[in-house]
Image: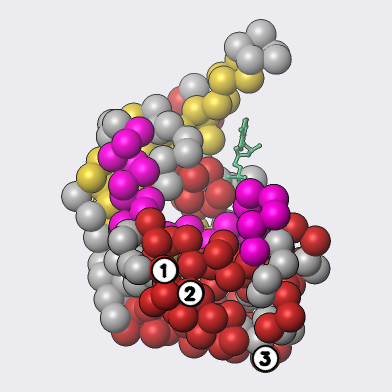
């Protein structure tokens, strides 16, 4: 479902004389339906960079990244958008939403985008918010003023409300208490059981060991500096 082959990544530092730095080379990784793979490695190893490349936010210098057959390294922007709407979910660490949109609509939106009718989308959003123990009095408010843990639950609800065949999870349990951490882990287990291919960053080792089938140390893809 997610096939990463020989990916290299360099950053160009425009504010430093256009210097280029290599952060990754020969990154190869494949994630099958129903499988969860954890990206591990020291801070700065390139875990977030690899996730952003899979989502099509960062361009690779070379190599291919296929998600459900679409090579995101060469796909047109509208193909990437279609992929994000239908196939590839992303639970990022931080919630980015349009101000003043009520939480219920924020969570229902991924379903409306794929053509679900409004009543069914809202019903599914309510169910997901209740499952994540977000108090009902908050559902009609914009999540912009919510606490870190409340925002993370809105983000998780939005990410899991549609049954994406592939998912990227960036620290999905980072700001949560034990009860809600458990809910998120069970959502991940359910997504795997229905065949979702998942790539995640989990600093929570216990969570990682429980839901991930394998871990990939991204430090292994560091460029060979001696050859540079
Ligand atoms: P991790 O998620 O494993 O902590 P990152 O993917 O955030 O690591 O970063 C990998 C390397 O790429 C780091 O050296 C970081 O400084 C660099 N990097 C990440 N994003 C950028 C950027 N937008 N511009 C320049 N360098 C970046």
Q: Tag 2's secondary structure? A: helix
Q: Is residue 52 above or below residue 213?
A: above
Instruction: Specify the label residue 118 is tagged with.
Output: 1
In this rendered view, identify the residue nearer to me: 217 or 56.
56
Give the residue displayed 33% in from the left and 67% down from the top: 116
> Real-space Cα distance between discs 3 and 1?
30 Å
Tell me the mark number nearer the camera, choosing from 3 and 2.
2
Tell me the mark number nearer the camera, choosing from 3 and 1.
1
Give the quarter of the figure containing the N terminus. bottom left
Q: In the picture provided, is 96 more to the left or to the right than 163?
A: right
- Give how far across and how far down residue 189 sits, in percent: 42, 84
Q: How is the image coloured?
A: secondary structure
In this rendered view, identify the residue nearer to me: 104 or 183.
104
Give the residue displayed 28% in from the left and 52% down from the top: 67
| Pointer 2 with pointer 1, Cβ within 8 A | yes
- Give how far across and how far down residue 156 sits, in percent: 56, 70
Q: Which residue is mark 2?
A: 122
Give the residue displayed 29% in from the left and 81% down from the top: 194
> Real-space Cα distance between discs 3 and 2?
24 Å
- Give how far across and how far down residue 24 sits, in percent: 47, 38
Give the residue displayed 58% in from the left and 57% down from the top: 92
Q: Which residue is mark 3?
A: 179
Crowd rating for badge 1 (residues with CA inside 10 Å; few <14, some 14–19, many 20+): some
Range shown magenta: 77-102
Instruction: Specify the label residue 173 is tagged with.
Output: none
């Amino acid at each position: 479902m997610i096939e990463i082959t020989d990916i290299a990544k360099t950053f160009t530092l425009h504010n430093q004389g256009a210097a280029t730095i290599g952060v990754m080379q020969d990154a190869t990784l494949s994630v099958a339906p129903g499988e969860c793979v954890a990206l591990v490695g020291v801070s700065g190893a390139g875990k977030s960079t690899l996730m952003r490349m899979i989502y099509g936010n960062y361009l690779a210098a070379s190599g291919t990244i296929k998600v459900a057959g679409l090579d995101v390294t060469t796909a047109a922007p509208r193909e990437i958008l279609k992929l994000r709407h239908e196939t590839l979910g992303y639970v990022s660490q931080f919630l980015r939403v349009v101000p003043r949109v009520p939480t219920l609509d924020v969570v229902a939106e991924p379903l409306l985008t794929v053509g679900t009718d409004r009543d069914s989308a809202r019903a599914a959003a309510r169910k997901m918010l209740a499952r994540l123990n977000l108090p009902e009095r908050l559902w009609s408010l914009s999540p912009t003023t919510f606490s870190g843990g409340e925002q993370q639950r809105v983000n998780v609800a939005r990410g899991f409300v549609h049954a994406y065949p592939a998912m990227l999870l960036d620290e999905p349990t980072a700001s949560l208490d034990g009860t809600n951490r458990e809910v998120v882990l069970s959502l991940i287990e359910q997504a795997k059981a229905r065949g979702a291919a998942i790539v995640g960053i989990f600093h929570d080792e216990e969570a990682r060991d429980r839901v991930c089938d394998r871990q990939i140390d991204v430090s292994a893809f560091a460029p060979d500096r001696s050859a540079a």
